[in-house]
Amino acid sequence: MINVNSLMHIEGLTILKDEPLSKYTGFRTGGPSTVLIPDTLECFISTIRSLKDNRLPFYVLGNGSNVLALDEGYDGFIVLTKKALNSIVVDGSSIKSGSGCMLIEVCRSALSHSLSGLEFAYGIPGTIGGAVYMNAGAYGDEICSVIKKVQILDDNCAIRDLDKDELDLGYRHSIFQDHKEWIILSAELALNPGNPKDISDRMKELLQRRKDKQPLEFPSCGSTFKRPEGSFASKLIDECGLKGYRIGGAAVSEKHAGFVINLDSATSKDILDLCLNIQKIVRDDTGFNLELEVELLK
């Protein structure tokens, strides 16, 4: 039983007990947990410090667009970033964004200031923090192409700045996957002046491509598997005849084989079992090992 007494003194902190995580994840699945919603940066830091001081388990969550929460829930605290870490500041050709800001809002801010370089991210359903954590990318570009520096809360709850070359950014990888105790507070992006019509046209083009090719009408976490070296996950899954393959309410999308979707009231177990079966079938049939891009919250 999680005890919230040690957090009751924190001003500006909303505490939601027995909150279904299905409300906060892309798959729309997941059992109960205690959800914490700090309302300012100061409140967020106080919350993290109190959790650490009291040795309480917690998980920092942005939009939940790349997370699978288990049906039994999470026996700890979920700390949301979207209210406390949502500032966007434009300074010349740089944008400093709180880690809880949605990528789509940062893209719109860039457009409103005629700044180019972030168009590829328009429509990615995540936060800046999640994008940095996963080095999110699309259409041949990645967030590492525009990162200048990242501000973090380290394991001692001290605020530190990390330059781009300290982030170990690679394909769907950053240093934060190896240092889970570090929390991304904000990111500074270096963009370029551009023509607002060209920027807008490119954003609209890429968003339309997403709508045409991806099953956006169903809950999902986007591309479920990382791209294996020498091939593509969606190609391998399709070649194995797995489009439409279903376990319970979870299915491989008929529209895009790289997407596992919540087709009809799926449970997290349905989704995880389906992913494990896909991995086995693809490995047995092709020799390729598919690694999950989605992270398990457990």
Image: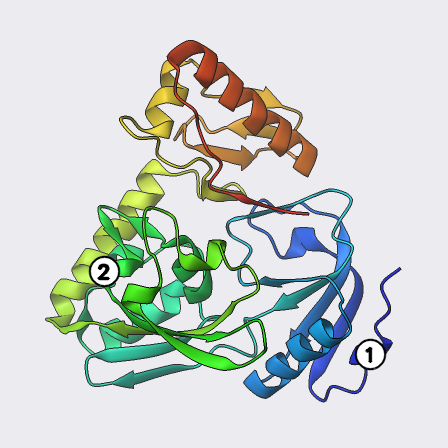
**Horizontal relation, residue 66 to residue 118: left or right:** right
Residue at the right extreme of this rendering: 1
In this rendering, the answer to whether 280 lies above or below 72 is above
Mark 1 residue type = Ser
Q: Circle 2 is placed at which residue position? A: 145
Q: Quadrant of residue 271?
A: top right
Residue 270 location (% of width, % of height): 66, 30
Residue at horizontal 50%, vertical 44%?
A: 221
Residue 50 shows which numbered tag? none
- Tell me if I can see residue 267 in this picture: no
**In front: 106, or 289?**
289
Q: Name the element at disc 2.
A: helix
Residue 143 location (% of width, % of height): 30, 59
Q: Circle 1 is placed at which residue position? A: 6
- Tell me if I can see residue 239 in this picture: yes
Residue 71 location (% of width, % of height): 74, 42
Q: Name the element at disc 1.
A: helix
Residue at horizontal 35%, vertical 70%?
A: 106
Q: Quadrant of residue 82?
A: bottom right
Q: CA distance from mark 2 to mark 1?
A: 41 Å
